[in-house]
Amino acid sequence: MKSQIKEVHGYVHAHGMPFKGKILMVASSPAISKQTGWPIGFWAAELTHPLQVFQEAGYEVDLVSTEGGKIEMDSYSNPTDASGYSAHDVISLGYMKSNGFGQMLESTQKLTDVNANDYLAIFLVGGQGPMYTFRSNKDLEQLFVNFYESKKPSAAVCHSTTLLLEAKISDGKLLVDGKTWTGFANAEEAYADEVVGQKIQPYWIEEEARKLPNTHFKVATPFSSYAISDGNLITGQQQNSGAAAARLVVEQLENTP
């Protein structure tokens, strides 16, 4: 039976909302880029924008990381960074002024210490770190596939979609076999490289995805909000797509019998 594909172009649960269950978000632990030498981690908007969607819809969120402990946002994603690259991101700025958010970043559980049965959905946070900490991470692959094969919404955005280049389901096929999905685009990589004046990433996700047989990697206009659901696999193109991907997660949860 052909998968139903839906595309969307566009943009602790809220006080007083009934508790509807828990969503697991996974971010990269701090790392050092072998490409640039920069300290890298998660992209702020790819955590905060989906977090806002989930909390306002009445879901509680637990944040875990690849190694546990304190996690750090990529400097270019910090709205207070001197570069001004993300100065427009008032959602992240608002969360950064919250004590609860600071505590969330200060002490994360390791992803292997959680029980997938406690959660309704999984959402992988992107950033520069996942290109090193998510790729070939068998523990994370197993966790994500567990959610996916349990028919729970399983979402990844931006560079976190690197996991899908290798993640396999129980029958040995790639999870993205026969699927339509998205992630950080070649055109966006080229733009970022030009802005900083050097090659940032060790490989490009779109370039690698297009080498895979029997899968359809699709991108929209660079840096537009774009997310796809193909069955319970949900993917977002880049940092401006996190909220759109999160809304697809919520939509699936609200429509689950």
Image: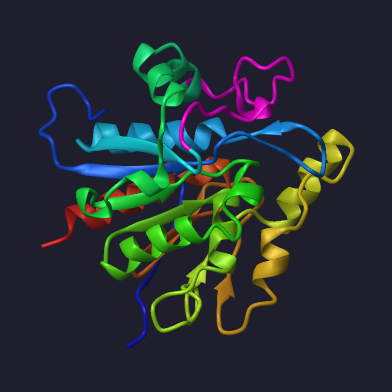
Left or right side of 5 for 220: right
At which x and y percent is residue 117? Answer: 21, 54
Q: Which residue appears at 46% of the width and 73% of the height? A: 175
Image position, residue 137 (x, y; %) = 55, 57
Kindly identify the residue that appears in the image at 23 percent across and 42 percent down. Answer: 22
Q: Quadrant of residue 59?
A: top left
Q: What residue lies at 70% left-to-right and 76% top-to-bottom? A: 211
Left or right of 52? Residue 27 is right
Coloring scheme used: rainbow
Where in the figure is residue 122, as x and y percent of width and height?
35, 51
**Is residue 97 depicted above or below 236 in this figure?**
above
Answer yes or no: is residue 182 visible: yes
Task: Name the residue at 45% across, 21% down.
Answer: 106
In the displayed image of the protein, which residue is found farthest to the bottom?
1
Vertical arrangement, residue 9 with respect to residue 41, above or below = below
Residue 227 appears left or right of 220: left
Q: Position of residue 190 (x, y in %)?
A: 80, 50
Quarter of the picture holding the C terminus? bottom left
Q: Nearer the viewer, residue 208 or 257?
A: 208
Q: Please state the extent of the stretch shown in magenta in the rendering.
A: 68-90
User: Residue 48 falls in which quadrant of the image?
Assistant: top left
Quadrant where the N terminus is found in the figure = bottom left
Q: Taking the image as drawn, is residue 7 in sight?
A: no
In magenta segment, residue 18:
no
Judged by its main secondary structure, the magenta piece is loop
